[in-house]
Image: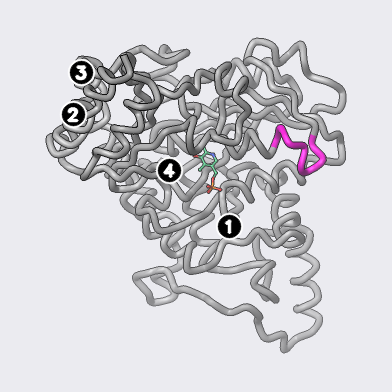
Amino acid sequence: MQHLDTSAVHAGREDFLQLGVHASPIDLSSTYPVTDLAVGTASLDALVAGEASAANPIYARLHNPTVARAEQAIAQLEGAEACVAYGSGMAALSAVLLARRGAGNHVLVVRPLYGTSDHLLASGLLGIEADFVSADEISARIRSDTVLVIIETPANPTLDLVDIEAVVAAAGKVPVLVDSTFATPMLQQPLRHGARYVLHSATKFLGGHGDVVAGVICCADEDARPLRTVRAATGGLLHPLAAYLLHRGLATLALRVERAQNNAIELAKRLQAHPAVSRVHYAALGTVANAHLLGSQMRGPGCLIALRVHGGYEAAASVMRNVKLITPAVSLGSVDSLIQHPAGLTHRVLDAETQLRTRITPDLLRLSVGIEHTEDLWDDLSAALDAAHPAVDKAA
Ligand SMILES: *Cc1c(COP(=O)(O)O)cnc(C)c1O
């Protein structure tokens, strides 16, 4: 079997030679001519029923070849039969929830997870009843109408790891969805551990350059069909221009993750020794839950670091204000480094009690490490942390 770094460059490009092209053709058609009505009708029926392709794409909400190539590439990287792409990670999660409804509308969710995912589930917006449980409560909390177990690993923002195989065993016949956005297929392939669905906010590492909003679900063919039907009916499409950028970004995924992770390993060590920092959450330091999964479930510790600073909110806000090279912004997985404050931004939608229970406290910062030179990143970060020290003194 091909190595992942080779697949990252070549997957989804299998028809290029035959087409006589070297880059993915961008097909912006919203509609497609139907000269043979019988073929058109059969194609429409097939696509609405969730087939991956048909003789005629009919209409862009049903199929787009540029999007399909990016999907094929991501499926190959995840070791999945299929991938279905959406206009965002949240649209992808919504599609799975809608597709699984019917047999029941109860889901089990292990916290912490991305703030808006938490909000979508807790709000019951889609008619889903979500129970938030710890991983070891899953088997006891499964009901006859439970249709999905949702976990995120590494989890946002504390970077705790969740044991996918243990969750799959506890879930029994109930399918498990893993949000693997933080890991990328380079570091973790949840389907190999028994998960039924893998979710990526492709806005992050898969796109990789901070210029695409996209989401994907990887799964078996039979599970992909209802997802495509939901996409056709609700319209949470990925635009072909975004799909092109996403596919182009994939080519360097292996390189980007390797370089950013090397930076993160070094920065995490240095951060742990910095006097302004009270705690660093990073798997390679053994300071996250289930760090023992490093080397088995996770091939590496990844490119994100969570850190706690002395001086609470004031010190954290001071770091955000004083970084110059690193961008103070939400999101992650870009070539450039980003730092953000989960309690104030990404996890702001959680109520105060949930924030506290999931250890999203005012002193917590989340750093997404990019591919810049390690020393330039450290110069910027350590200067911002040094500048936060007076804020600590003032608060004291
Ligand atoms: C960003 C993110 C999402 C949501 O994805 P969007 O593309 O922003 O809709 C979901 N899960 C995780 C872990 C994320 O980081």
Above/below status of 206 relative to 353: below
Mark on residue 196?
none
Three-letter amino acid code at disc 1? Answer: Gly
Is the CB of mark 4 within 8 Å of ligand 1?
A: no
- Magenta residues, start to end: 121-128
Q: Position of residue 16 (x, y in %)?
A: 41, 69
The Cα–Cα distance between marks 3 and 2, rounded to whole angstroms, is: 8 Å
The Cα–Cα distance between marks 2 and 1, rounded to whole angstroms, is: 37 Å
Is the CB of mark 2 within 8 Å of ligand 1?
A: no
**Residue at the bottom extreme?**
35
Above/below status of 87 relative to 94: below
Q: Which callout, 1 or 3, points at the residue further toward the start of the chain? A: 1
Q: Using a 10 Å C-alpha cutoff, classify the residue at mark 3 as few (fewer than 14 neighbours), some (14 to 19) or many (20 or more).
A: some
Residue 125 on the magenta span: yes
Three-letter amino acid code at disc 4? Answer: Val
Q: Using a 10 Å C-alpha cutoff, classify the residue at mark 2 as few (fewer than 14 neighbours), some (14 to 19) or many (20 or more).
A: some
**Mark 4 highlights which residue?**
330
Please state, as top left, top right, bottom left or bottom right, where the C terminus lies in the image. Answer: top left
Between 272 and 315, the one nearer to me in the picture: 315
Mark on residue 87?
1
Q: Which residue sits at x=55%, y=35%?
A: 348
Q: Are marks 3 and 2 in contact (CB under 8 Å)?
A: yes
Q: Position of residue 65 (x, y in %)?
A: 55, 68
**Mark 2 highlights which residue?**
382
Q: Is residue 350 visible?
A: yes
Badge 1 element: loop
Between 394 and 140, the one nearer to me in the picture: 394
